[in-house]
């Protein structure tokens, strides 16, 4: 999914930093490309920004996830996903019926 980065608010960034400090395993659902998502379980090892000002989390598994691609993190909506509360409460292992 190669899209323009949409900055996330400081509060969400702070929540990720707190999760990294706690070192608990979390469940993350995120967009991998238009209309496709993935789910990973892991511990946040780092929250960082690139030279292009795009922010990512690094999991202990080595996976990186761009912050504006996060749908839910431990069942809570990611940035810009507040209006999609269904993602936080629905079974993300199920396919969407069209």
Image: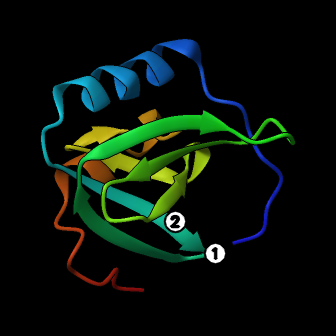
Q: How is the image coloured?
A: rainbow
Specify the quadrant of the image occupied by residue 29: bottom left
Assess disc 1: are there few (<14), some (14-19) or many (≥20) residues with their C-alpha within 10 Å of its C-alpha.
Answer: few
Check disc 2 and report the residue beneath it.
Answer: 31
Say whether residue 12 is left or right of residue 59: right
- Give SS at disc 2: strand
Residue 46 in view of the camera: yes
* Distance between mark 1 and mark 2 Cα atoms: 7 Å
Query: Could you tell me which residue is drawn at 52 percent across and 65 percent down?
Result: 31
Say whether residue 40 is left or right of residue 48: left
Residue 78: x %, y % from top left: 43, 39
Quadrant including the C terminus: bottom left
Query: Could you tell me which residue is drawn at 34 percent across and 85 percent down?
Result: 97
In this rendering, the answer to whether 36 lies above or below 30 is below
- Give SS at disc 1: loop
Q: Which mark is residue 34?
A: 1
Mark 1 and mark 2 in contact? Answer it, CB < 8 Å.
yes
Say whether residue 16 is left or right of residue 95: right
Residue 73: x %, y % from top left: 30, 44
């Amino acid at each position: 999914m190669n899209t323009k980065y949409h900055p996330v608010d400081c509060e969400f960034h702070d929540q990720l930093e707190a999760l990294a400090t706690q070192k608990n395993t979390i469940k993350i659902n995120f967009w991998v490309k238009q209309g496709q998502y993935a789910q990973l379980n892991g511990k946040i090892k780092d929250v960082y920004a690139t030279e292009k000002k795009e922010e990512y989390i690094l999991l202990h598994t080595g996976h990186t996830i761009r912050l504006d691609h996060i749908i839910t993190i431990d069942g809570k909506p990611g940035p810009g996903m507040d209006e999609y509360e269904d993602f936080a409460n629905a079974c993300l292992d199920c396919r969407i019926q069209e």
